[in-house]
Amino acid sequence: MQEDVENRTINFAISTTKLTGRTLLAAARKFLQWRAGKARSKPVGKQSVKQLLRQDQGATNIEIEKTGIRDFKRILDKYGVDYAITKNHDDPPRYLVFFKARDADTLTAAFKDYSAKLVQKEKRPSVLERLQQFKALAAELVPGRMKEKKQERGER
């Protein structure tokens, strides 16, 4: 059994060393077919509006403010929604989020998740405000021991 495997390995190695023009041409054709098949596959997630409309499934859009566009992208990727984002050049810039019509139910679930995340962010206290509160408490406990750091800049 072991000799048989070694024999096949050697034969395989010998046959690949004898490359001809036809073998190279066949390999190049296979590679180009593979590349063409890969290019035809549908893009998933973030894509251009042109790619989204090319899929012939109908696209709808919504407006969103810039404030949470990065978090919104993360949630859309999490839910597997195919989307495209374009910037509207108004005075307060707005963003249009295009998505496929078949993703409408998924998008509503993503919006619920996004809005829950925004509410949770608003409820969370600011770290800087809490730090100021703790500094004030520490200063009341031990008056005169708290040092304030002030940076002075000299002119050169």
Image (cartoon, helix red, strand yellow):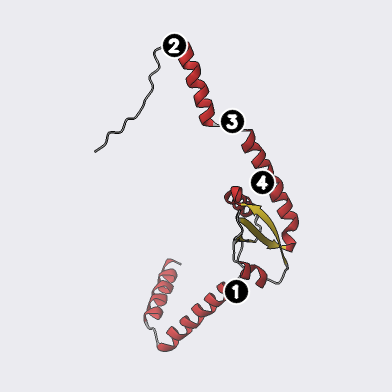
Q: Which numbered mark, 1 or 2, is in the foreground of this view?
A: 2
Q: Which residue is mark 2?
A: 142
Q: Secondary structure at mark 2?
A: loop
Question: For the point 72% across and 50% down, which residue is it?
Answer: 109
Alpha carbon separation for disc pair 2 and 4? 44 Å
Q: What's under tag 4, amino acid-wise?
A: Tyr
Q: Which residue is mark 4?
A: 114
- Farthest residue in the left direction? 156
Alpha carbon separation for disc pair 1 and 3? 49 Å
- Farthest residue in the bottom direction? 21
Question: For the point 43% across and 73% down, which residue is it?
Answer: 8
Q: Secondary structure at mark 1?
A: helix
Q: What's under tag 2, amino acid-wise?
A: Val
Tag 2 near tag 3, CB within 8 Å: no
Q: Earlier in the sequence, mark 3 or mark 4?
A: 4
> How many residues crowd around disc 3 within 10 Å: few (fewer than 14), some, or many (20 or more)?
few
Q: Earlier in the sequence, mark 2 or mark 3?
A: 3
Residue 102 % position (x, y): 74, 62
Alpha carbon separation for disc pair 3 and 4? 19 Å
Residue 150 % position (x, y): 36, 27
Q: Who is closer to the viewer here, 4 or 43? A: 43
Alpha carbon separation for disc pair 1 and 2? 71 Å
Q: Which numbered mark, 3 or 4, is in the foreground of this view?
A: 3
